[in-house]
Every structure is written in structure tokens, then in C-alpha cells.
Image (spheres, rainbow, N blue to C red):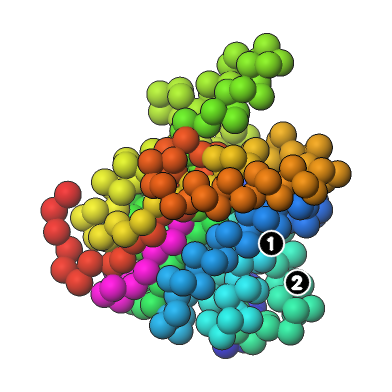
Amino acid sequence: MQTSIRQESPRLPAGPFDEKAAAYDSSFTQTALGMCLRTMVWQRLDAAFTDCSRILEIGCGTGEDAIHLARRGHNVLATDASKSMLQVAKEKAERAGCAQRIQFRRVPMEQLGTELSGDLFDGVCSNFGAINCTSGLDELITEIAPLLRPNAPLVWVVMGRQVPWEWTWFLARGEWQKAFRRQRTGGVLWRGLHIVYPTPKELARALSPYFAPLRRSALGFALPPTFATSWLENSPRILATLTHIERAAQYWQPLAALSDHYIIEARRSAVDTDA
């Protein structure tokens, strides 16, 4: 598989993540917190995708996860709505020497079912809140289900709704609206995008017509959200302590509902059932 970025539809405008592409890795991926969180996600991806040859990634960003999967021997179709993110990802994959295993494609997640119709994948993943940006969660799940083989694993990292870390951080600064922004009915508008925050139970319920939920785990219960992490760069001992607590928290599924993100794992049902 040759690495490429297919010509996108001229109807696709520049998205809100285009301007973030150049600085995303320095502001998150390469930070101490970013590397710590991503390592935890990779452990779940590696455990879930042991028998997967071809994986669909939704919202690949700058390609860090696609490159990891390619290095593990998987072939990846990495999709994103941001042209700039995809360009950064393509260049990184070429430098990493795994370009032949990754195809990058500019496709909004709401169009995956149409654009990839007839294609089949052995697994699907999405990391760090890309799923929260969909305009219709139920519709997205309905769109991707036919793209997956029976028993194909799904691993999504989703931003949660109840985040004590966020409450504490913003309340201490007197920013009440920011503290409880994820509680707003219908989600939050951000740079023209409608961001939703499904709870783990709500997402499991939305998946259930087509997927059998297997596991949910916390990601950001003890470790703080990215906006509150600059102090961790110079506090390796505190980071190590919080990481230890975080890893322990992942074994208690109820804590997934109290985390900045959570990891949900499921398998494509052999036969679709009603919700």
C-alpha cells in the first residue's frame, strides 16, 4: 500500500484543525503528558488488534497512531477532515520509514460510509476526542458498521462529560462557565464544530445495535487535561506518581465516567440486532 493523500472534494473547506496542525505535536504529542497518555492508548490498541491486517483510523490528526500501527505490521487507512493535519502526517510517515503501510485520505467522518462503501476493515480506531466532533454519533456508527468484518475490534478514545479535574481547575480560577461547559445540553459549539460529550454508558448504548461493548477504561482520571499540564514538564516525580494512579484506575471501569477521556472497546457483532 503506497502512502498517498487522495484528492479531496472541492466542497471541503479548511477546517478548524488546519491552523493547529503545525504546532499540535509540540503542544501535545511531544509533551511528557502527551507521550504518557498515548503510550497507554497504544497498549490497548496493541492488545485489541493482534489479528488485524487492515485498520481504519478515524481522525488521524498528525499520524502518530497510524505510524505506530504501521510499525507493528498493520496496514492503515488513516482519515481526517483536515488537509493540513494529513500533510503533516504524510511527511512524518515518510520520515518514519513506514509510508508503504499507510494511506492517508481526507474524508469527514460523516462521509465515511459513502466514500468507503464496499471496503472492508479488520478493525477501527479513533484517538483523543475525534469522535466527539461528529455531528451525529448514531449516524456515524451506522455508517462505519458495514465497513467492518464480523468480530472486528473497535477502540475509541473519547472525551468524557464528567471531569472533576476540569471542575477543580476552572472553579479555582472563578471560571464557572468553563468548569461545567461539558454539561450543556446538546454539547458545545467550538469554531463552527458541534462538540458532544457522550458518557461511557451512552456511547455503549449507541454502539450496541452493531457492536458488543467489551471494556471501558479511564484516561485522564488522575492525570490532568492538557490545558492544565505545563507544570508537569518540570515535575517528573509527580507525573510518575499520577501515572501510577492512572494505570491503577484503568482497572476500575466506573472511573471511566469521571475522566477527561475514556477508552471504549467493542467488537463488531456477527449479526446486527435492534438497540
Question: Which residue is painted at 46% across and 24% down in the image?
Answer: 183
Question: Which residue is painted at 49% across and 65% down in the image?
Answer: 44
Question: Which residue is painted at 54% across and 76% down in the image?
Answer: 76
Res. 215 image quadrant? bottom left
Q: In this view, does 78 lie to the left or right of 152?
A: right
Residue density around tag 1, few if under 14, some if 14–19, many if 20 or more, within 10 Å: many
Q: Of all residues shown, which one is farthest toward the left? A: 274
Q: Where is residue 207 in the image (x, y as percent from the top left)?
A: 29, 53
Give amino acid for label 1: Thr
Q: Position of residue 111 (x, y in %)?
A: 43, 58
Q: Position of residue 79 (x, y in %)?
A: 55, 65
The residue singled out by tag 2 in the image is 92
The answer to whether 232 is drawn above or below residue 163 in the figure is: below
Q: Is residue 266 left or right of residue 7?
A: left
Q: Position of residue 212 (x, y in %)?
A: 25, 60
The answer to whether 220 is drawn above or below residue 91 in the figure is: above
Numbered badge on residue 62: 1
Give amino acid for label 2: Lys
Question: Which residue is painted at 57% across and 66% down in the image?
Answer: 42
Q: Where, quadrant-wise, is the N terminus in this rendering?
A: bottom right
Observer able to see residue 108: no
Between 163 and 99, the one nearer to me in the picture:
163
Q: Does the magenta stretch include residue 160?
A: no
Q: Does the magenta stretch include residue 155?
A: yes
Res. 120 image quadrant? bottom left
Between 147 and 274, the one nearer to me in the picture:
274
Q: What stretch is highlighted in magenta?
A: 146-156
The answer to which of marks 1 and 2 sits earlier in the sequence is 1
